[in-house]
Amino acid sequence: MAFQIQSLPAEAFAPLFDLSDKELTARNARRMIVMSKPGTPCRVSLADADIGETVILLNYRHQKADTPFQASHAIFVRKDAAQAHPAVNEVPEVLQSRLISLRLFNKSHMMIDADVVPGRHLGTAITDAFGDATVSYAHLHYAKPGCFAASVVRASAG
């Protein structure tokens, strides 16, 4: 089954970079300068930030549905990040290079299955998961820190 990984929208985070550090702290967010690479995966560009880049670390509510699986976690976004638009069945390098928790949800936003897979096998795992018609969408998390990475939806291959 064809899939498409979706990044978070750049416009949702751009205004944060105009806030002072005090204003960010009041929102439980922090401005940071990247000190090592890899290690700071941006959820807008779906790429690791480069050393010296400015990022904002913030809490993001990635599962907004009114179910027991409602959830949020810390994410990084890069200043002036180029919006990622992965092609159908494309798995960005930032996901291929890490251990990924694959969480599968039905149309009622209830998690119906989950797995942990090496990123290099993520495309196959998503394709296999979407072979189950009850799977409506998936969330990807970086398995070690547990933070949200991206969402996945069904796509047409043509």
Image (spheres, grey):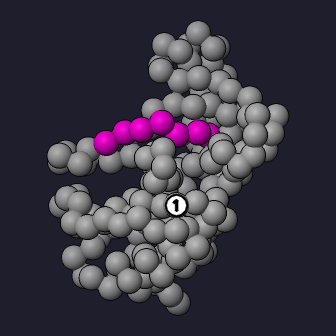
For the point 43% across and 47% down, which residue is it? 146
Q: Is residue 138 left or right of residue 43?
A: left
Whole-percent x, y for residue 112 in the image: 21, 66
The outermost residue toward the bottom is 158
For the point 43% across and 77% down, which residue is it? 125
Up the image or down, 13 lies above or below 132; here it is above
Quarter of the image for the N terminus: give it: bottom left
Whole-percent x, y for residue 74 in the image: 48, 36
Disc 1 secondary structure class = strand
Asked if the magenta segment contains residue 16, the reply would be: no
The outermost residue toward the top is 22
Taking the image as drawn, is residue 138 in sight? no
Amino acid type of disc 1? Leu
Along the line of sight, which residue is nearer the eye, 142 or 45? Answer: 142
Along the line of sight, which residue is nearer the eye, 18 or 55? Answer: 55
Q: Main secondary structure of the magenta part?
A: strand
Q: Is residue 118 left or right of residue 21?
A: left
For the point 63% across and 63% down, which residue is it? 97
Taking the image as drawn, is residue 48 in sight? yes
Tell me which segment is drawn in magenta. 71-77
Along the line of sight, which residue is nearer the eye, 79 or 101? Answer: 101
For the point 41% across and 69% down, which residue is it? 153
Up the image or down, 59 lies above or below 102; here it is above
Q: Quadrant of residue 85?
A: bottom right
Q: Label 1 belongs to which residue?
A: 99
Whole-percent x, y for residue 44 in the image: 60, 49
Q: Is residue 67 left or right of residue 118?
A: left
